[in-house]
Image (spheres, rainbow, N blue to C red):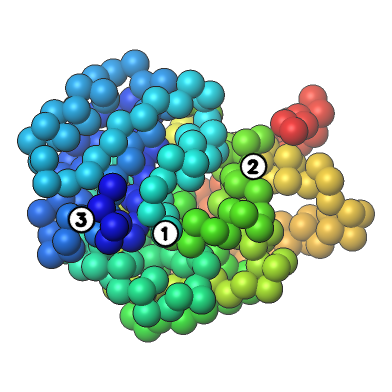
Amino acid sequence: MPNNLFLSIIICTYNRANYLHDSLQSLLGGPANPSSFEIIVINNNCSDDTAQVVHKIIKDNPNYQIRHIKESKQGLSHARNRGISEAAAPYLLFVDDDIQSTDEFIPAWLRFFKNHSDALVAGGKIHVQFDAPRPPWMSHFLLPLLGHHDLGKSPKKYPKNKYPFGGNMGFKKSVFEQVETFHTGLGRKGKGLEAGEEKELFKRIRTLGYAVHYIPDAFLYHRVDAPRLTIPYIRKQALGLGKSMYVQMHNASPLQRIIKRGTELIKWLGSVPLAIGYLLRFQPQKASILFKFRYWIEKGYREAASVGRFLF
């Protein structure tokens, strides 16, 4: 590896070869010096032609440092942890396998970490790119489920109750010498839609007193296809969120459990004025899905509790 390698971009993928091809292409050809970053694709037991797609990209782009690595332990957290161990650069950047990078994306990350040597963790801006018509029930408040993440145009430190999204987050690699890597009992596994591993990691980092930075110029698009724009998919995602919430509460104190359940109640109550607003604008589908979403999260939590879902 060249001496000026600074950033390892890690893409964990599972059977998304077509999107992965486009994501890789969008990361290449920009203004960033190819010797300053590498791209590591973690193939998490893909059964499609992911390997062939990556190897062709490698062959067609000899000036770039691109690696294809297979991780046999199923799960996004396992794949991300493998990426951390494989990375050769001092800084790590995680992106999803279905993104569209902007020209400024990689330069913004390089610039931030070079100018903020004390920063250990940061997140960038993500907007949703719909690859199919947006359904009428999809409100602005559900867009974060599809990866939308925007804290504005100015750099800042994340507020206490907010965290970067997994599709655009960066770390100084040395931070993982102080905290453990991603919790392998959380996060997606194959076709499952569990979550929570990113927030859990950021909470551990924050307990050490480190700030989490927001970089608006590190901007990309998260592409969303038709199968993910269905109510059954949103239901499955909400159930996964509820199950993940239960796993995170496994070792929580009674007070922490009360606070978490209180937070969920506040979210229920907060849905009421939002729903009323949609009803007044004659958009009943958007009002209905807000309550269904909260119900499904609660259902996922209770289903996990009923079977003692301890994934540790």
Residue identifier under label 3: 35
- Which residue occupies the foreground of this view, 64 or 57? 64
Q: Which residue is mark 2?
A: 183
- CA gap, disc 1 to disc 3? 14 Å
Residue at 51% x, 76% y: name it: 118
The residue positioned 50% from the left and 48% from the top of the image is 289
Say what secondary structure mark 1 lies in: strand
Find residue 156 and report its horizontal and vertical position in percent: 46, 81
Which of pointers 1 and 3 lies earlier in the amino acid sequence? 3
Relative image position of residue 261 (x, y in whole percent): 79, 55
Q: Please, what secondary structure does the residue beneath circle 2 have?
A: loop
What residue is drawn where x is 28% and y is 36%?
67
Of 142 and 158, which appears nearest the observer?
A: 158
Q: Is residue 305 left or right of residue 275?
A: right
Say whether disc 2 or disc 1 marks the residue closer to the N-terminus: 1
Residue lying at 66% horizontally and 67% vertically, measured from the top left: 206
Quadrant containing the C terminus is top right
How dense is the environment of label 3, judged by Cα within 10 Å: few (below 14), some, or many (20 and up)? some
Which sits earlier in the primary sequence, circle 3 or circle 2?
3
135 to the left or right of 188: left
Quadrant of the image occupied by residue 93: bottom left
Could you tell me the amino acid type at mark 2? His
